Image (spheres, rainbow, N blue to C red):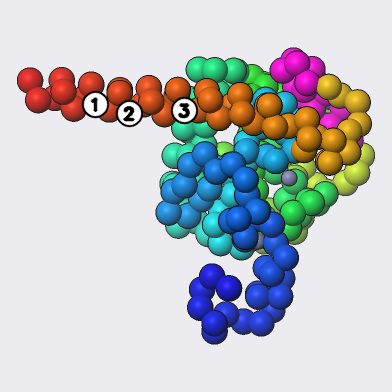
Amino acid sequence: MRNGKYDSLDAEVSNMHCAFCNRDDISYIFKETPNFLLAADHAPLVEGHLLIIPKQHYTCYGDVPAAMDDELLTLKHEVQQFFTRFYAPAVFWEHGIFRQTVFHAHLHCFPWGATGYDFSEGLHNAVIDSQEGVRKWYLSQGHYFYMEDRSAALLFAPETERYLGIVKSVFWRGITSSGGRVEWRSPQQRFEEGVPLIRAVLEKWQVFQQGTKQGRARKRATMRF
Ligand SMILES: [Zn+2]
Ligand SMILES: [Zn+2]
């Protein structure tokens, strides 16, 4: 119950068991902004697997209001800088509601450089250039899944064939290129094997944060002269 006891009962029932509404359930929070958390996926596929989670309960990013776009973009940009410095540029991924395991919007961030997606495969349904595109799709078509790298942001209709096509071409490539393992592992196994990966990315994040703080201090110092 985050917004007082007059929340609608529906919202309360659906949020009660939501892992992302209960902050205590999110073990590694890297950063907090007014409306978002940047956290480690607790069962990471590779080192650097992070999540951007709105603090309020939204079912997917198609449901997140436009007023939060700038804040989201700034946070994505920061992840992009972090990944580019320590790993490779970011691939952002959202299931939408399709194949979600936690029913609260979250954007996966993977340090894979590029998706390597082949447009001629025609698995995507739309190329978009802003969050507005995600909202429009969600409003008119409903569920989706979403993938973005530095060259394009794509929306896909929630169909198993498209999904598996992307998992095979993009995920397998990304996981192997970051030294991960592509054989199927249970979430429990990924969780147990994930602890050293999370520690490693957290250490790099601290170095990164230190760097940005020093950068800001340097800027302030030079501005004084
Ligand atoms: Zn929630
Ligand atoms: Zn997910």
Marks 1 and 3 close (CB-CB < 8 Å): no
The magenta span reads 162-180
Q: Quadrant of the N terminus?
A: bottom right
At 65% from the left and 75% from the top, the residue drawn is: 12
Asked if 163 appears above or below 26 in the picture, the reply is above
Marks 2 and 1 close (CB-CB < 8 Å): yes
At 71% from the left and 75% from the top, the residue drawn is: 13
Q: Is residue 165 left or right of residue 71?
A: right
The amino acid pointed to by label 2 is Lys
Q: Is mark 3 within 8 Å of ligand 2?
A: no
Query: Mark 3 or mark 2: which comes first in sequence?
Result: 3
Q: Quadrant of the C terminus?
A: top left
- Circle 2: is it few (<14), some (14-19), or many (20+) Cα within 10 Å? few
Residue named by callout 3? 206
Q: Is residue 81 left or right of residue 102?
A: left
Specify the quarter for ligand 1.
Answer: bottom right
- Circle 3: is it few (<14), some (14-19), or many (20+) Cα within 10 Å? few
Could you tell me how far apart the alpha carbons at marks 1 and 3 are, in whole angstroms? 16 Å
Q: Is mark 2 within 8 Å of ligand 2?
A: no
- On the image, the x and y values in percent for residue 208 come to 45, 24
- On the image, the x and y values in percent for residue 55 come to 54, 57
Residue named by callout 1? 217
The amino acid pointed to by label 3 is Gln
Asked if 81 appears above or below 14 in the picture, the reply is above
Residue 80 visible in this rendered orientation of the protein = no
Q: Is mark 1 within 8 Å of ligand 2?
A: no
Mark 3 vs mark 2: in front: 3
Helix, strand or loop status at disc 2: helix
- On the image, the x and y values in percent for residue 197 come to 68, 26
- Circle 1: is it few (<14), some (14-19), or many (20+) Cα within 10 Å? few
